[in-house]
Amino acid sequence: MARKPHQYRFSVGPWNFSEGQDPYGPPTRPAQPFDWKLEQVKRMGFDAMMFHDDDAVPDLDEKKDAQIRREARELKKRLDDAGLFAEIVAPRLWFSPKTIDGAYTSNDPKCRRYAIERSLRCIDIARALGCKLIVLWLAREGTYVRESKDASRCVDYLVQAIDKMLAHDKSIRIAIEPKPNEPMDVAYIPTIGHALAVAQLCSDPKRVGALIETAHCILAGLDPADEIDFACRFGKLWSIHLNDQNGLKFDQDKPFGSVNLRSAFDQVRALERHRYGSRGECVAFDVHPFRTTKVEHWSKHLENSRRTFLHLVEKARSFDEAAAKELIKDRNYADLDQMVLEHLMGV
Ligand code: XLS
Ligand code: MG
């Protein structure tokens, strides 16, 4: 019997309304206050917002715990009023002078301690926002110089940090977002396999899972759809950042499907196969406007990514699975290949 198709919920981060600066030039759009971003998210009809800890409470290293909690509660109220919720909160562990040599894996014990304390405050913020999912993008956990760190000891540091977070709040779950490089030359958790292996070493492996970002898989030379299937097979895909990436270069965060529509279709098909979203997971688009984007087109990359996604959900649901099965039985992959292309072209 065919299963009832489920609805998707969509989420977006304030950083997805970026201003266009790159290492070679200044912003091309004027910075907007948080309320403007909230208004855009509401207007677009998204369901949730993602936060870094300091998106929620700016300059939190300078603030006392009580003030942090108060500001987070005020934000929760604004989200409630807008009919939105916080999908994830992620500690920003790559900005402070204390994370120059890494956060959890810094060679300096004082800096490692800072990273853990900051992560526990991030959990307190998440709690005030009514959010149970903490995302770890391990931006600076890796090396520029291979001999500068012991990669095996760094696994222990990561596990110790995650264990402290799990103990701090028994109700949170942690989703690790792998990325193979940038800002580091070589990162310690480059793929979903690495993330899930680390989860197994933690004190409560059931509460440690993953967030997949399309571009990060491509940068690791992997197929994002296979990564989705792999994580889902373990019941570990708890959030997703769909976007696109044109080959092995700087992290581009292009609109979903903008480079490789077929790969985007395969990603959606994998999500559909596992009924991703039916257990409350959100679809987020970790996309950025092109630098050339005018102010009046500032949200287009998000709306367009959602449009492409929803069209591809239709394409996945209308794909002739029975015909595909016959072709697979006959090992006629040539026609299977063409069938996918013509389905996407609508011919
Ligand atoms: C950067 C990451 C970041 C995370 C949240 O590449 O994708 O945006 O999603 O920390
Ligand atoms: Mg991301």
Image (spheres, rainbow, N blue to C red):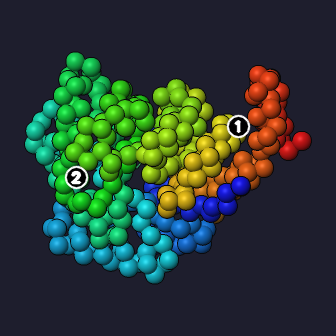
Residue 344 visible within the image? no
Say which residue appears at 37% left-offset and 74% top-offset. 76
- Residue 139, located in which quarter of the rendered image? top left
Q: Residue at x 34, y 70 (%)?
A: 129
Q: In the rendered structure, find residue 108 and report the number of the disc placed on it.
A: none
209 and 205: which is toward the camera: 205
Quarter-wise, where is residue 35 in the image?
Answer: bottom left
Residue lying farthest left? Answer: 110
> For the point 37% across and 32% down, which residue is it?
194
User: Mark 1 or mark 2, which is nearer the start of the sequence?
Assistant: 2
Query: With 331 as the anchor, is 74 left or right in this view?
Result: left
In the rendering, at what x and y percent does residue 145 appear? 27, 21
The residue under label 2 is which amino acid type?
Answer: Met
Neighbour class for label 1 at 10 Å: few (<14), some, many (≥20)?
A: some
As drawn, is 236 to the left or to the right of 63? right
Name the residue carrying label 1.
262
- Quarter holding the C terminus? top right
Residue on which the image places disc 2: 165
For badge 1, the amino acid type reads Arg
Residue occupying the far right of the picture: 347
